Amino acid sequence: METENVTAWHYRWVLNINYQIKDNLVLTYSFGKDFDPLLKVNGNIISSLGISFGFGNPKL
């Protein structure tokens, strides 16, 4: 009896968007799919919204 090997492709992807509002202020959004979740609740989509205030030394 022959057995068939089937290799399924599995992709993980993430989209990152950064928008510079001012010199020291950046808005960031990330969206992705097929990541291993810490908690399994109806799927595995990630979404994140963040803001960076740019504390620290000036850019060189």
Image (cartoon, rainbow, N blue to C red):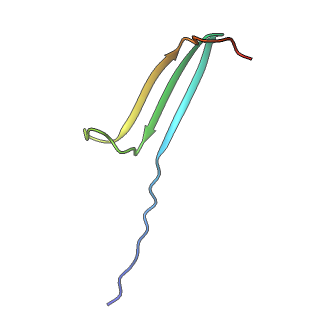
Q: Which residue is found at the position 31% from the left and 90% from the top?
A: 1
Q: Residue 58: horizontal and vertical position, in percent?
A: 68, 11
- Judge whether 32 appears above or below 20 on screen: below
Check the image and name the residue furthest to the bottom: 1
55 left or right of 5? right
Residue situated in front as seen by the camera: 26 or 6: 26
Number of numbered discs on residues: 0
Relative to residue 44, is residue 58 depicted above or below? above
Q: In the image, residue 44 lies at what x, y percent?
A: 34, 41
Identify the residue shown where x is 57% and y is 11%.
55
Nearer to the camera, 52 or 42: 52
The quadrant where residue 32 appears: top left
**Residue 3 location in percent, x, y?**
35, 82
Q: Residue furthest toward the right?
A: 60
Q: Is residue 44 left or right of residue 41?
A: right
Q: Residue furthest front?
A: 57
Q: Is residue 16 above or below residue 54?
A: below
Q: Residue at x 50, y 39 (%)?
A: 14
**Spot occupied by residue 20 in the image (x, y as percentages of width and height):** 62, 16
Q: Residue at x 43, y 63 (%)?
A: 8
Position of the C terminus by quadrant: top right
> Image check: 3 left or right of 9?
left
Place residue 19 in its image quadrant.
top right
